[in-house]
Amino acid sequence: MSAPLSDATLGSIDPRVEQPGYDRSIVTPGIVHLGIGAFHRAHQAAFTDDCLWDGESHWGIIGVSLRSRDTRDALKKQDCLYTLAIRDGDRQQLRVIGSVCDILVVPENPALVLEVMSSPDIRIVSLTVTEKAYFRNAAGDLDFGHRDILADLADPRRPRTIFGLIVGAIEQRRLRRIKPFTVMSCDNLAANGRTLHRLLVQFATRRSEELADFIRDHVSCPSTMVDRIVPATTALDRSEVGALLGAEDAWPVACEPFSQWVIEDDFPSGRPSWEHHGATFVNDVEPFELMKLRLLNGAHCAIAYLGQLLRHETVADSFSDPRVARFVRALWRELIPTLQQGAGLKPAAYVEDLALRFGNSALKHRTAQIANDGSQKLPQRIVAAAMERLDRGEPVDHLAFVVAAWIAALLSRQPDTFTDALDPQFVHLDPSSNIVEQIFTIAGFASGDPHRIPFAKQVATQLARIDESGVAAALGALNGKA
């Protein structure tokens, strides 16, 4: 068995593998990242690694896991090094990333995490925690009925959530007269920076009006758009990477070559020079973010739920099915008119790139992975677009079909396939009553929108066709109209 990847074994790995071209011993942390998962390690950590190559040694990353210790346990024994496997077709490029300096686990020592975030050296706190970690209610506000939010308000010294951590650290810094850090969401939320800022202020208000005012006036939360397809790491990935590397890597990350990062340039305490390595800084990220949310993430939802119903294991498998590919192209035709016009976007070229990316067979991106937490993803990606089109009197056949496919997959799924944040409520669905209306109510889809009822009726019609004739026939009938 090969020795584990580490600073000590870097000199013995395959020389064809790119490794840190800087002295890791002089790197100091300037970023705390909440949610040290595969996506962050394939995206923001790789951009930051490029900056360390340029000598920006004060921008190392301390990763924080909000719940699980698995990533920390895997990477700490290898000095937080890991391999990025960039795959396209039958080609693969390996690169060892060294930008992560340490990894902390919140439940083990929340006070330590707060103390690290309160250090004057930390100038950015970034996040990739997925939509459900923002604890929003049906109205889009912070859910003050959630037990974790209540726990953070009751015991600020032992935070569990991003709100308890960020607000707690800002409060400590303020008491110590340390300038607040910039808070940068990299999650797939519309207007993610503004959304996070509003939720932080709502949380802080329950602590004190003075603290809420301070965050409102002095804490910057730039919005971002991030884009790279990053499947979950498998045992086969570990085996293949280890063999090529010549060292054992407990948690490599596979990804596609494509990578995009659009960021609002609002960093009062400084930032790495990410723009030197492909990031784009803009005044308003919203048009780019919306294009990605709807055209990539919305299509991913369609591919995932149709894939689950048609028993396609991966995105490439699903998109190679002509029925699915034709559906997705028709879905794009419904979505593109909902994007902001004249903002420098090139949606026609973007979807052609997406078609190539979805067909990348080297990425074993499981449809079950993407299918998780549809109740949290569909509102921004699909439902909001449907409301806009209905408001203009335009058809929403394919948008409604995506939601119907989600419900069909949700109701027919086998154990250990995919899960949803609202599963505790979904188990109480009454099969003798209107299923679509129940699910829309539980998930808060289009709550208060005048087009909610007609859209729900269209979803119910599509769901009935799937139930009666099967997804293949229902899809065929819809594709025949496209």
Image (cartoon, rainbow, N blue to C red):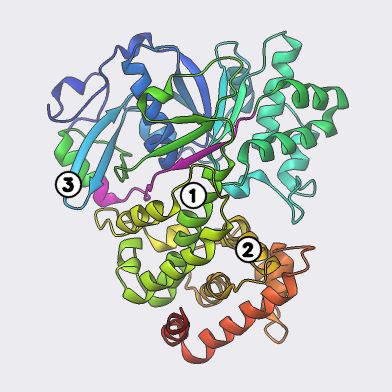
Q: Nearer the viewer, mark 1 or mark 3?
A: 1
Q: Say few, some or many: other residues with alpha carbon within 10 Å of mark 3 (under 14 / 14 to 19 / 20 or more).
A: few
The residue that label 1 is drawn on is 292
Tell me which corner region of the image, top left, top right, bottom left or bottom right, holds residue 58: top left
The amino acid pointed to by label 3 is Arg
- Give the magenta part as a residue range: 221-237
Q: Earlier in the sequence, mark 2 or mark 3?
A: 3
The single residue placed furthest to the front in the displayed view is: 342
Cα distance between the residues tagged 2 and 1:
15 Å
Name the quadrant of the N terminus: top left
Q: Say few, some or many: other residues with alpha carbon within 10 Å of mark 2 (under 14 / 14 to 19 / 20 or more).
A: many
The amino acid pointed to by label 2 is Val
Cα distance between the residues tagged 1 and 3:
26 Å
Q: 427 left or right of 45?
A: right
Q: In the rendered structure, does residue 225 fall within the stretch colored magenta?
A: yes
Label 1 close to label 3 by CB (< 8 Å): no
Foreground residue, 128 or 462? 462
Foreground residue, 257 or 135? 257
**Which secondary structure, mark 2?**
helix
Residue 207 % position (x, y): 83, 29
How many numbered discs, if any? Answer: 3
**Which secondary structure, mark 3?**
strand
The residue that label 2 is drawn on is 383
Tell me which corner region of the image, top left, top right, bottom left or bottom right, holds residue 445: bottom right
Q: 253 left or right of 2?
A: right
The residue that label 3 is drawn on is 91
Residue 235 shows up from this direction = yes
Q: Nearer the viewer, mark 2 or mark 3?
A: 2
The residue positioned 83% from the left and 32% from the top of the image is 205
The amino acid pointed to by label 1 is Lys
Residue 150 % position (x, y): 78, 42
